[in-house]
Structure formats: C-alpha cells, structure tokens
C-alpha cells in the first residue's frame, strides 16, 4: 500500500481544516483557514463555493507542508463537510450558478410551511426520517431552481449539477470526473429515501420536479470514489471516505454500539445516538438519519438532535457585539461569576432546531439588570449550549428507551473545562472528552483508511480511542431542575417572534 498517512479534509461552516494522520491516529500536520460569510438578507446565509474550494485546497497543501510530507505519501483522502449546504454549478465550465446556500439559511421557511400545509409531513418523515424544515437541502434546491434565471431549464437539460459540499470538493479534486456523494449527505437533502437507499421520485416531484440528472450518484461512506487529479493535488490519491460532519464525528468517537451518544460542539451542535441497523422513528421531533455505510455492510442509523446555534453564539459575542476578543475568554468570564444571576440567552439567531423546529424563533436575552456584565452574556452563551444539548438528549432517551450512561463530547468547545463541567451538571450524566477533539476529521480519516486497508477493521480503530478528561456531575438535583426550568421559560419567550424576515422575495 502506497503512503504512510491519511489526509482528512474537514470543510466546515466557517472554516476549512486539513489534518494529516499517521497509522497511530496521531496528528502529524494540520492547517485551518476561515472563509467569508455572506448575509444578503436577514435570515439568509451564503458561501462562495469557489472560495471554499480555494481555501480547502490551500489548507490541504499547508497541512502536507506542516507534516513534512508530499502528496505521494498520502494513502487516502477522507472528506467530512458541513451538511445540507447546497451548491449548483455548470456541468461544462464547473462554475457555480449562484452562491452556495448554507444549512443555516432560512429563506426556504415559507416553502416548507406550504409543503406542510399541503400534507407532506408524514410522507417526508416516512421516507427521509426528517421533518420539513428550511434547514435541509430540499427547499434550498427548490429556491435555486425557481429564483435563479435559467437554472431550472438548464438543469432539466442536464447542463447543471447539484451537490452538497462533499460532492463539490470531490468534483474539484478529481478534475470533474466524479459527481458523487455518500449515504449520510444524501440522507439530509429531503430527496433521498433512507430506507430504500435511492433518490425518491415522489420527493423530487414535491420539490417542484428536481431533475434526476442533476443529482450525484450515492455511494457508501467508506468507499473509493475516485482518484485525485495529479495536476490539482500533486499525485493520484484515492478519495475513499466521505461523511457529513456529525456522522463523521460519531465514527471518530468509535460509537459503534447501539445507544452510544455524542455531541459535537461547533458552529452548531449535533447530538447523535447510534441505533444500529434498525432505524428508530422519533415521536419527539428528533431526526432519524443514516449514521454511515461501510462498503457492502448493512447501512446503520442514528437518532439526531440538530442544534443550529452554539459556537456561533460565541462568535456573535466576538464579532457582532465585540465584547470578547477570542472564544477562549468565555471560560474565565463564566467562572468569574458564582451563578448566572437568572440571565439566559436563547441563541435562536436562525430559528430553533430539535426538538422545537421553529423557523420563526429569534435570539432572546432575558434577565438583564443594571448589574449584568459581559461575563453574564459569556456565561449565558456557554450555558445555552448545554441546555440545548439536554433538550435533545432527553428526547433521544425517550425515543430509544435507552438511558445514556456516559456522554461523549468533542469539537472546539469541548476544550472549555467550565462548560464541560456545566454540561455534566445539567445532564446529570458523566461527560467524556477524547484526546483528539477533532473527531470529525478523525472519523473521515478512519472511513477512508478502512476502505483501502490502511486500518484493518473497526476493532483496530476502536482500540485507538483515548480519553482526555471525564467530568462527573456535581450539581444537586434541585438546582439542576431549577436552572433547566428557567431555560425552558426563556425558550418559550423566543418562539415565533419573526414572521416575515426570512421570507423576503428575491430582489
């Protein structure tokens, strides 16, 4: 087998990261760069797909340089990506026809309201495991087809291709030879039947007749999709693993047994519970989603609680309000207070996800007094991540009938010791943080490595997981429930605030 390393691309919502892993799963080189966020209207969020590609290719090269290796030393490439974000591009030129519409974008809220009013909710849930919400790709695709001049006709003529970000990156890496995605990303589009494992004609018709010719081929998550173009990457290297960021993190946490649960704290947060080869249909507005597919093995499923804004709330404190200079400051600020002094921040900046699914909720801060300070806002932002996580965990436990014995936490905010202790306290469950916080990238690397035999099997992968720190609950039950009860009151005040802001027509 050529190559002693696996390169993982983690194409996230605000940055692209590349990490070089060795056979021991250790990081030997990495690079990260942020890219531009575009907010053309209230509730709208876009990315420049060309900029994403340029930044991603740049960090790949920088990670190789940091590791002191060349493209020829890489055995395989794994990709993990922001899910649900939509790109459409010209088949001949490879040029995007519009900015990518980001998963956070709410312009499809009215489309989704109309679909629900037309009675599609049950059909969608039965085929996709999802709810009808602007979070998913479907309403974004419908909006692009209907609002960008000539795109629908061009798509029907086979001149336009659609993809989530993984598809776009693979297309560019392979020099336009591969138009593919994996089960996990397809499962987030509102167009893919996660039980029959195929694009669904009824769903495509529901969304205004999405042309099949525009859709990528769907493959397992651990699978050789094609080789990189040597002129693009510097060598022909198999792209062999793909998973949406949250499924990749679940795999990176080696959550291979039924009931194992993790939360990844990024721009948003996503709690996933592995449920095995039998999907569980949620009665509490959790999502049923594909966890992964490994080669020819049966597809495995997960329950998911999608939380739209967590780390992005801290970014807002930094970039929007200017009250902190870095996310790391929040730990000391939160710890400087003896309590939250009844200040709560509901970060519904793009609506609320699971289990509320309220596109019209808006960010709300309650409990401010003359004595409130930036420390209160910082603490409230950190606490909000933990309360929203409990919202999701309680629903998943009820749906599955499984009491989670320990909770795995990863992503950037898992390095915040104050927050992880509060998370354990508000859950009443021990929280385990792994040695490698970037489990999303590690999961993508594992999927790619397994496809080419770099790692032998899941047991070998499992043996490489290492614990960094375990947090035991210290808060008494009465205080835990008092704080959580006040959080729920704050959420009620944030709901259904906006009605028109995300529904503005295209200028």
Image: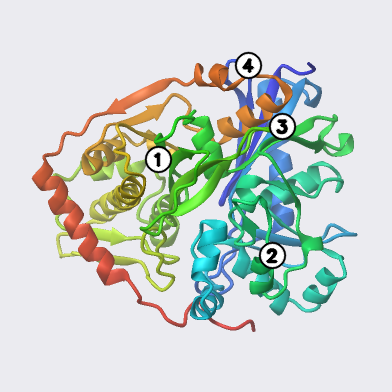
Residue 321, position in %: x, y?
38, 61
Label 3 to label 2, Cα distance in Å? 26 Å
Q: Quadrant of residue 370?
A: bottom left
On the image, numbered disc 2 is attached to which residue? 99
State yes or no: discs 2 and 4 in contact (Cβ < 8 Å): no
Mark in the foreground, 1 or 4:
4
Q: Quadrant of residue 245?
A: top right
Q: In this rendering, is residue 46 above or below 398?
A: below
Quarter holding the N terminus is top right
Label 4 secondary element? loop
Mark in the foreground, 2 or 4:
4
Residue 260, position in %: x, y?
40, 34
Q: Is residue 216 left or right of residue 471?
A: right
Label 2 to label 4, Cα distance in Å? 38 Å
Q: Is residue 158 left or right of residue 291?
A: right
- Look at 65% across and 38% down and name the residue there: 221
On the image, numbered disc 1 is attached to which residue? 413
Mark in the foreground, 1 or 3:
3
State yes or no: discs 3 and 4 in contact (Cβ < 8 Å): no
Mark linked to residue 23:
4
Q: Is residue 19 visible?
A: no
- Look at 79% across and 42% down and name the residue there: 173
Which numbered disc, 2 or 4, marks the residue that appears first in the sequence?
4
Q: In this rendering, is residue 67 above or below 330?
A: above
Mark in the foreground, 3 or 2:
3
């Amino acid at each position: 087998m050529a190559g002693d390393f696996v390169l993982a691309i983690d194409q996230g919502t605000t940055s692209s990261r590349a990490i070089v892993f060795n056979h021991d799963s250790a990081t030997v080189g990495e690079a990260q760069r942020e890219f531009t966020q575009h907010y053309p209207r209230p509730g709208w969020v876009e990315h420049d797909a060309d900029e994403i590609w340029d930044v991603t290719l740049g960090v790949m090269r920088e990670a190789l340089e940091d590791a002191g290796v060349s493209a020829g030393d890489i055995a395989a490439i794994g990709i993990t990506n922001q899910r649900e974000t939509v790109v459409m591009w010209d088949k001949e030129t490879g040029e995007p026809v519009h900015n990518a519409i980001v998963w956070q974008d709410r312009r499809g809220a009215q489309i989704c309201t109309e679909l629900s009013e037309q009675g599609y909710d049950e059909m969608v849930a039965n085929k996709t495991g999802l709810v009808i919400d602007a979070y998913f790709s479907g309403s974004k695709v419908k909006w692009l087809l209907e609002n960008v001049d000539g795109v629908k006709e061009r798509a029907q003529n086979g001149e336009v291709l659609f993809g989530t970000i993984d598809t776009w990156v693979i297309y560019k890496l392979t020099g336009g030879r591969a138009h593919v995605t994996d089960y996990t990303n397809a499962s987030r589009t509102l167009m893919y039947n996660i039980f029959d494992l195929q694009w669904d004609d009824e769903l495509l018709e529901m969304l205004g007749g999405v042309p099949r010719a525009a859709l990528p081929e769907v493959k397992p998550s651990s699978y050789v999709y094609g080789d990189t173009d040597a002129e693009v990457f510097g060598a022909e290297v198999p792209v062999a693993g793909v998973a949406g960021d949250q499924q990749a993190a679940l795999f990176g946490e080696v959550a291979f047994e039924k009931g194992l649960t993790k939360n990844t704290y990024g721009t948003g947060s996503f709690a996933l519970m592995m449920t095995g080869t039998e999907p569980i249909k949620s009665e509490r507005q959790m999502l049923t989603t594909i966890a992964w597919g490994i080669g020819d093995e049966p597809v495995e499923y997960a329950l998911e609680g999608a939380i739209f804004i967590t780390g992005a709330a801290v970014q807002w404190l930094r970039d929007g309000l200017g009250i902190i200079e870095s996310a790391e400051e929040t730990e000391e600020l939160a710890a400087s207070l003896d309590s939250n002094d009844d200040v709560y921040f509901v970060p519904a900046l793009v609506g609320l996800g699971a289990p509320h699914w309220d596109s019209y909720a808006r960010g709300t801060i309650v409990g401010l007094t003359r004595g409130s300070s930036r420390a209160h806002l910082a603490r409230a932002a950190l606490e909000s991540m933990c309360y929203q996580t409990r919202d999701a965990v309680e629903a998943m436990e009820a749906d599955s009938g499984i009491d989670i014995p320990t909770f795995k936490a990863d992503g950037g905010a898992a390095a915040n010791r104050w927050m992880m202790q509060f998370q354990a306290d508000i859950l009443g469950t021990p929280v385990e943080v792994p040695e490698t916080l970037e489990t999303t990238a590690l999961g993508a690397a594992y999927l790619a490595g397994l496809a080419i035999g770099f790692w032998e099997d899941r047991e070998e992968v499992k043996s490489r997981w290492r614990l960094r720190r375990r947090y035991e609950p210290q808060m008494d039950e009465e205080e835990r429930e008092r704080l959580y009860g006040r959080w729920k009151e704050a959420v009620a005040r944030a709901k259904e605030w906006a009605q028109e802001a995300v529904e503005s027509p295209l200028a």
